[in-house]
Image: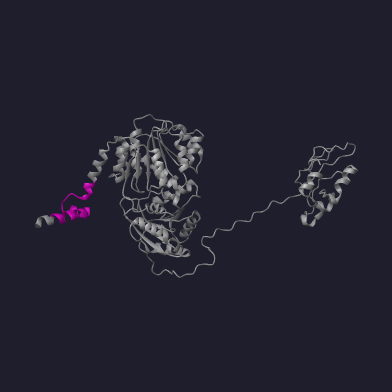
Amino acid sequence: MPLRQVLNSYEAVFWNASRPAALRRQGAESEYESHQKEAAVNFATFKLHPQIMAGVEAAGYQAPTPIQKQAIPPVLEGKDVMGLAQTGTGKTAAFVLPILERLLPGPRGRVRALIIAPTRELAEQINDNIITLGVKTRLRSATVYGGVGLTPQILKLKAGTEIIVACPGRLLDHLNNKHADLSHLEVLVLDEADRMFDMGFLPDIRRILKFVPQKRQTLLFSATMPDDIRKLAHEILHQPVTVQVGHTAPAHTVSHALYPVPQHLKTGLLFELLAHIDAGSVLIFTRTKHRAKRVGQQLEREGYTAASLQGNLSQNKRQEALDGFREGKYRILVATDIAARGIDVSSISHVINYDIPDTVDAYTHRIGRTGRAAKTGDAFTFITHEDEQMVRSIERVLGEKIGRRTVLGFDYAKPAPKRDEEFARPPREPQRRRQQHPVSSKGAAPSSGHARPKGPKQASHPGSKKPASTHQHRGFQDLHSSPSRGSDRAAPPSPKSQHSKPRPASEHPAERPAAPEQRQHHERPAVSTGQRRSFGPRVGRRK
């Protein structure tokens, strides 16, 4: 091979591997400048409206991501699209930009696009992108999700909006109450469809489909494709264009590490690990809401600026924690999987799985929070002996074995406590039973010839002040005062017993209520003097 050809080949390798600064020092056009030119050309080829291009520039978008390059053209052509891409690949803009382009020239004041998302955080994130990219279009969007009041959402829907970003449950409430009209819908988007399936929203999605017109454009985006989601895609998509970016495995910009540790030492290892790594923003995932709250509190006691994000928080507190983490107020955020799809923070340097997730897809979504926008990130996972099967499943998807690590100086031999004091729930306060107080004489009704009969389960109380009739008919009194017939009628209390606490029924064997089969024949009202033996309404059945 000639020497010049060899030098040219090495020069080409150097151009591809070197940094822009090194290329500029050689007086050549930098790779960065070429990237900027390519970005301008690519966004220009979409032929978006100038008002939408102004939003693209305001958002700071430089180059379309692979999912945007492949998905935007068919969506602009009005075709159904099924997109397979991981979180953090820019797929939100892949459907928001074409929707804005389609709705811009049409009528206003009616719902023309519906975007369904699994979580409130993701719904707010999508709505923020719509506001940013459509800042010059004057198209209106509204978010609809639970955990907040209905009235503000109803007012927005009645005022007229062109785009709705909603979670399935609250959207169904509005549709059933006729607060929203989807009869003019043109575009339906199901974002993070696999996550909605995991959360049990698939039946709600099918109910929502009954409110939208059959003739529409449908877009379905998902990081993974379970069988149920694939079946749903075949039902609702018409000759879709399939767009797949990369493999459904975690991004290659993320490095993985496993930390074997007993369950009772996880919190101590977390503190030791945070002290040794040079991390920016750290996202920690736990399996339960209670554990997320406790770990967040323990981090705060150790002096870290930390917050927890879990389902028991109100929407305002969840949004405050998310905004504080995004703005740098909190360095650490402890969250459950419900927040894995709604956190859009590009500066997350580390994701720590305090508890390993239940599925490989959940692992993909968790660590998709780091290594975003071509940046690198680290994913650390604490594992116990019970997690080995899930570890092997994750390694099969990655196509390689994940390295096991230990922290020097950490005591792994510390024995487990006899009881779980770290995450034990606080004991509930004892519930006081309602005490039955004697009926005062002021509230007692005066006796009459036709006294109200007692119910079949009501027995006279030894401390009751209600006077009994002393002018009962002799035959009726003899019939019901015999102990052998199971009478539960008590003698008038003495003045001393009126002010004393009633004793338990075990101390008054003669005053216990009769059995139901005995009571229903012998509880009858008293009869006053001078009246016929009319017993009023019968309580028991006639023998």
Residue nearest the viewer, comparing 504 with 276: 504
- Quadrant location, the N terminus: bottom left
Q: Tell whether 528 sits left or right of 149.
A: right
Whether residue 272 appears in magenta in the rendering, the answer is no
Instruction: Answer with left or right where residue 137 lies relative to residue 31.
Output: right
Estimate the x, y position of residue 135 in percent, counting from the top left.
35, 37
Q: Position of residue 331 (x, y in %)?
A: 40, 55
User: In the image, residue 441 lies at what x, y percent?
Assistant: 80, 45
Nearer to us in this view, 442 or 235 = 235
Q: Is residue 506 visible?
A: yes
Q: Closer to the camera, 348 or 518?
A: 518
Residue that protrudes farthest toward the left in the picture: 2
Residue 455, picture quadrant = top right
Q: How many marks?
A: 0
Q: In the picture, residue 108 is in which quadrant?
A: top left
Q: Main secondary structure of the magenta part?
A: helix
Colour scheme of the rendered structure: one colour
On screen, residue 461 versus residue 138, left or right, reads: right
Where residue 307 appears, as percent x and y from the top left, is: 45, 54
Residue nearer the viewer, 215 or 437: 215
The stretch in magenta equals 8-35
Residue 32 magenta-drawn? yes
- Point out the image quarter for the C terminus: top right
Identity of the residue drawn at 29% across and 46% down: 66
Q: Looking at the image, which residue is at 50% across and 49% down?
A: 313
* Residue 18 seen in the current view: no
Return the residue found at the far top: 107
